[in-house]
Image (cartoon, grey):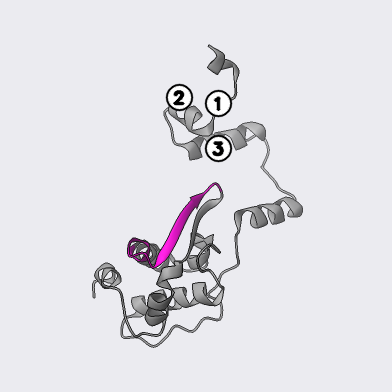
Amino acid sequence: MLDELGPVALADAARELGCEPFDVIQLAVSARSGLGASPLVFSRAEVDAMRQMGGFEATWWTDVQLPADASPELARVRAAMQQLQMRGYVGDKQTRVDNVWRGLDAEERDLLRRAIAALVADGLLVATGTSAGIRVSIASDGVGAVQDLVGGKATPESLKAELGE
């Protein structure tokens, strides 16, 4: 009885409605904007605040030259790891995982999703779920192995398997 008087958490609302938490959020935004009666608009300041809060970065890929590699897929992965390295995303300093592939086409995004998952499973990268999205960085213990990958000296077996090499 007392539980019915308090606020309902997102996961509990989703469970009660029989839907995903994302659906509850989407409905809450629609409800607060008049159920679609008018377009939902944001001020520039609100967009900037969301960018800051969410950790959204512009695409990393504008001027990136892929390293020479017999495998274009491995070249893309090596370049992505180099970007993490150059931007200092090591250990506790993490970035949104989608910053890694923002601006790439769907096929390359999927490639990097799979590669990152393999490197997380190997312990070379660390992924952390947060309220603002999944964050990723090079594991402190994986710096040397990632450097070898970036330099083309070694490719982890899990990554070879993921890329079908």
Query: Real-space Cα distance between discs 1 and 3?
Result: 13 Å
Residue at (66, 52) in percent of width and height: 50
| Image depth: mark 1 or mark 3 in front | 1
- Between 69 and 93, the residue placed more toward the observer is 93
Mark 1: amino acid: Val
| Inter-mark Cα distance, 3 to 2 | 14 Å
Label whose residue precedes the other's in the sequence (1 or 3):
1
Q: In the rendered image, which residue does mark 1 sit on?
A: 8
Q: Are marks 3 and 2 in contact (CB under 8 Å)?
A: no
In the displayed structure, 99 sits above or below 73; it is above
Which residue is drawn at the image coordinates 48% and 37% (left, top)? 21
**Cβ–Cβ under 8 Å for marks 2 and 1:** yes
Residue 25: give its label: 3
Q: Which residues are magenta?
A: 118-131
Q: At 28% from the left edge and 71% from the top edge, which residue is drawn?
A: 163
Crowding around mark 2 (Cα neighbors within 10 Å: few <14, some 14 to 19, many 20+) is few
Measured along the vertical axis of the image, is residue 105 above or below residue 45? Answer: below
Identify which residue, 45 or 105, lies in the foreground: 45
Residue 47 horizontal side relative to residue 27, left or right: right
Residue designated by label 2: 16
Is 14 drawn above or below residue 158 in the view shown?
above
Percent position of residue 37, x then y: 66, 34
> Residue at 70% across / 46% down in the picture?
41
Asked if residue 127 can be seen in this view, the reply is yes
52 horizontally vs 136: left or right: right
Q: Quadrant of the C terminus?
A: bottom left
Type of residue at label 2? Glu
Please provide percent x and percent y for residue 111: 37, 67
- Inspect the magenta stretch and tell me whether residue 129 lies in it: yes
